[in-house]
Image (spheres, grey):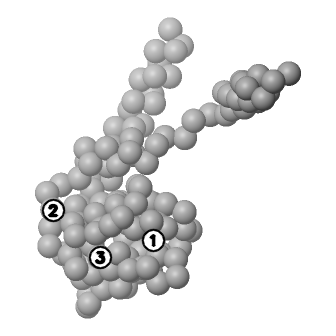
Amino acid sequence: MGYKTILAVLAALLVSACSGIPQRTSDQEQLERFQQYAGEPVSSVPYLGRYDSWRPLGRDNLVVWTGVNDAYLLTIAGPCFDLPFKQRIAIKSHGPTLSRGDSVIVGRGQRCMITEIRPVDYRKMKQDAKAKQQEETNSAGE
């Protein structure tokens, strides 16, 4: 067998092996979903020095939850290269608010300045997702 034939066989095996793996929603798709529920940009939001959860949405965006339904879509001056790959971040704010100009610290001290903050109607987002899931379940059962 020639070199090209071996590469073609290996490529085919790799593609077929990966075809059964469920695809995770891409960061871009998730970003678009959060943008649908995001309000107009605000200059700051209340922040008491802690957040409940966060999710990277590529190298330039992340969502931070400060409560069960209190979510904020942050755009950062970037790209913040390590953001999609880290499990922990720190947020450096100047006082009791999270403001444009504050920083998200990723990895070994990479500072990524916050350039935009948009509140997300996360409660509505969850309600719509649940309704869509019920609709799909009802459609499949018919």
Q: Position of residue 88 (x, y in %)?
A: 53, 73
N-terminal label among 1 and 2? 2
When the figure is inspected, residue 24 is found, relative to residue 5, above or below; the finding is: below
Residue that protrudes farthest toward the top in the picture: 142
**To which residue does mark 1 refer?**
52
Residue lying at the far bottom in this picture: please name it.
Answer: 95
Q: Select label 3 or label 1 by which is in front.
A: 3
Local secondary structure at mark 1: loop
Q: Is residue 40 above or below residue 6?
A: below
- Disc 3 marks a residue whose amino acid type is Met
Q: Amino acid at mark 1?
A: Asp
Nearest the camera: 130 or 21?
A: 21
Q: Nearer the viewer, mark 3 or mark 2?
A: 3
Q: Mark number for residue 114?
A: none
| Dot 3: element | strand
Name which of mark 3 and mark 1 comes first in the sequence: 1
For discs 1 and 2, the disc positioned in front in the rendered view = 2
Comparing 115 with 119, the one in front is 115
Residue bearing the label numbered 2: 41
Image marks 3 and 1: residues in contact by CB distance under 8 Å: no
Amino acid carrying mark 2 in the image: Pro
- Can you tell which quarter of the image residue 8 is in? top right
Residue linked to disc 3: 113
